[in-house]
Image: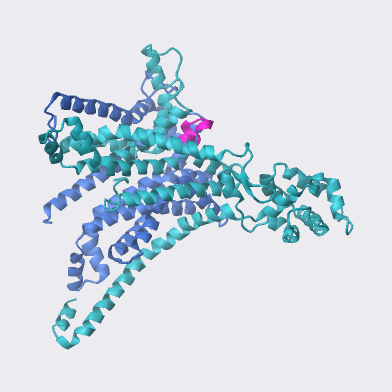
Chain colours: A cyan, B blue
Amino acid sequence: MTAAFVAGADAPTEVPLKRRLKRAERARQFKALALVLPLLLFLLFTFLGPIAGMLWHSVEDWEVPKTLPHTVAALSDWNGKDLPDEKAFAALAGDLQAARAAGTVAIASKRLNYTINGFRTILASTARNLKTAPEPGTAKDTLIAINPAWGDRATWAAIKSASGPLTSFYLLGAVDLTRNVDGAIVAAPAEQAIYRDVFARTFTISFGVTALCLILGFPVAYLLANLPAGRSNLLMIFVLLPFWTSLLVRTCAWIVLLQSEGVVNDSLRWLGVIDEPLRLIYNRFGVYVAMTHVLLPFMILPLYSTMKAISPAYMRAAASLGASPVTAFRRIYLPQTLPGVGAGSLLVFILAIGYYITPALVGGAADQMISYFIAFYTTETVNWGLASALGAVLLLATLLLAVVYGKLVHGQQVTGGMKN
Amino acid sequence: MSANHSPRTTSQRVAWITTVVASTLIFIFLMAPILAIMPLSFSSGAYLTYPLPGFSMRWYQDFLNSPRWMLSLKNSMIIGVASTILSMVLGTMASLGLAQWKSKFKPLVLAVVLSPVVVPGVITAVGLYFFFAPIGLTGSYAGLILAHTALATPFVVITVSATLQSFDMNLARAAASLGASPLVAFRRVILPLILPGLASGALFAFATSFDEVVVVLFMAGPEQRTLPREMFSGIRENISPTITAAAVILTTVSVILLATMEGLRRRNERLKGNLPG
């Protein structure tokens, strides 16, 4: 730097100086990038890659092409209107015998069973009864004789639609849609169409929790913002301590408090308010209480920092101009808190829609949110396609809200709503 | 009642008193679970009800004598410390880079770096489960440490970046002009000044890992169960008083982390107050 300035005093060397500065700046930028790069590569492996993998699972269709490759090939030029020709039947017979020998029939039948309930039985019985390869030209009759379902073009349409390599089946299923025999998108049959309800429930609970957090958080933030620093710092402990306490500890504590032999019911009975214990947990009420408790600090902190920045001079000015306290609060104070209200509400809502642990532990079967179903299909029924598709919808909703949140707090502190 | 707020009219006074009363009730709501569970852990009875039949430490003894709980505590410490170290190295380097890097891609990179905070836990967990299972990283410490590092690093980047923002880069230039190599300048000039910020970042990282349960739920084998994971099973099966002892131990760790963090923040503010500008 010093050397550069000395050189700069000499007029003819001005151009090289500029170039040297530029070069130095470029080297600096390169070094800066080199410092960020390890984290980016790390996240590629431990975060972005896995999420991309999940998204891929929601559209990939590998089971049928892998286990019934010749059938898939034979069906590639099928018009889908009549039954496929003899060639396809023969290919299926060959594939099934090979799959039975390799023990892979279950892979294809599991996938096809998602499309047509009962396909598992069709494939299993056919594979079992197909002792020898059918005589050339008789494959069609042989298969239909073993199971008449092979004479139904819906059976073949199911195989064709699962032929991969990509499918919209899971993503459509995640929003209660499916394709009919002709490939048109239609509403899913009622017994499978549960996910719109689950999403609606997820949004309802999240909205309710956000509203409760706003109602409870507003007076607390107002109090903290208007008390002298010493006292508000002291009271802030009541917000920060629960915030830092483990989620599991708090959930566990709510169960202890709210269960039928719990502290709340015992106290109410002791006071003579009730005779029979109230049902306060393992239902929607418990979910609202526990989730509001966990998320309330996320509302209070952004509200507090917004209110802290509102100068009391505005309210004094309003009063001196003749506004009643209510009018001054409503027309002067409240509008200035809106950025905090927006940031806090969005943050609580974003966190709420992804909640899993709390509803799983304090909710009943009818209170489970979308995350529960994602976990259920991943580990219990191992329907990774549907789990991923539901995950993709949740991810999309979260990212959209996060973008809005980012725009809203743009210019405000990035850390405004986070643990701080 | 307060310095900033001076209620003049009756209606204002009523509004203020209402706020104070409502806030008091909400503070009770916020503190109730922690306050309710603490005494129960010292109960001599086996039921989680009041009044307590007597005082005893039996549930803490139970906790300390249980190989299952002790293993989970050990696992939480191993995974917490390892992912804290890893996220500190990656996060501090990235923060130093981001502070100097000028590019139109910077907001995008920042969004990517911070995204693990926003993405729902189940999505991260499911993605990692699919991704790590084929390469043998599920049911291993390594897999959990990598996953927790990814979740904790955003907090390190946020905290350290905030500290660097208030750091005067001219000090680094001064060090360079006096002949210090970049490494020496970092170690002798930058590091001591940003140390409180780094410590806060480390506490955040540790707290994130120590409290995380969703990823552990998907990825941990029986040998890697952490304290929150063990509590999850405990709550599912049947809440024994031993869980309340575990909860109090976890809460104590939280209080220590919070107190340390608060101490660092105060110290930092004091230092800033002493420096001009």
Q: Residue furthest right?
A: A135
**x and y percentages locating residue A189 in the rendered image:** 64, 39
As for residue A152 lying within the magenta part, the answer is no
Split into 4 quadrants, where in the image is the C terminus of chain A?
top left
| Residue occupying image coordinates x 19% and y 24% | B14
**x and y percentages locating residue B203 in the rendered image:** 32, 48
Which of the 4 quarters of the picture holds residue B76? top left
| Residue occupying image coordinates x 51% and y 57% | A52
Residue B121 vs residue A406, the one in the foreground: A406
Q: Is residue B136 above or below residue A376?
A: below
Position of residue B9 in the picture relative to residue A334 (left or right): left
Q: Residue furthest front?
A: A322
Residue A356 vs residue B61, the one in the foreground: A356
Position of residue A107 in the picture relative to residue B82 (left or right): right
- Which stretch appears magenta? A358-368
Position of residue B272 in the picture relative to residue B44 (left or right): left
| Residue occupying image coordinates x 13% and y 83% | A9
Main SS of the magenta part reads helix
**x and y percentages locating residue A359 in the rendered image:** 47, 35
Residue A382 vs residue B104, the one in the foreground: B104
Q: Is residue A238 visible?
A: no
Q: Residue furthest bottom?
A: A12
Which of the 4 quarters of the picture holds residue B22? top left
**x and y percentages locating residue A89 in the rendered image:** 81, 55
Split into 4 quadrants, where in the image is the N terminus of chain A?
bottom left
As for residue A363 lying within the magenta part, the answer is yes
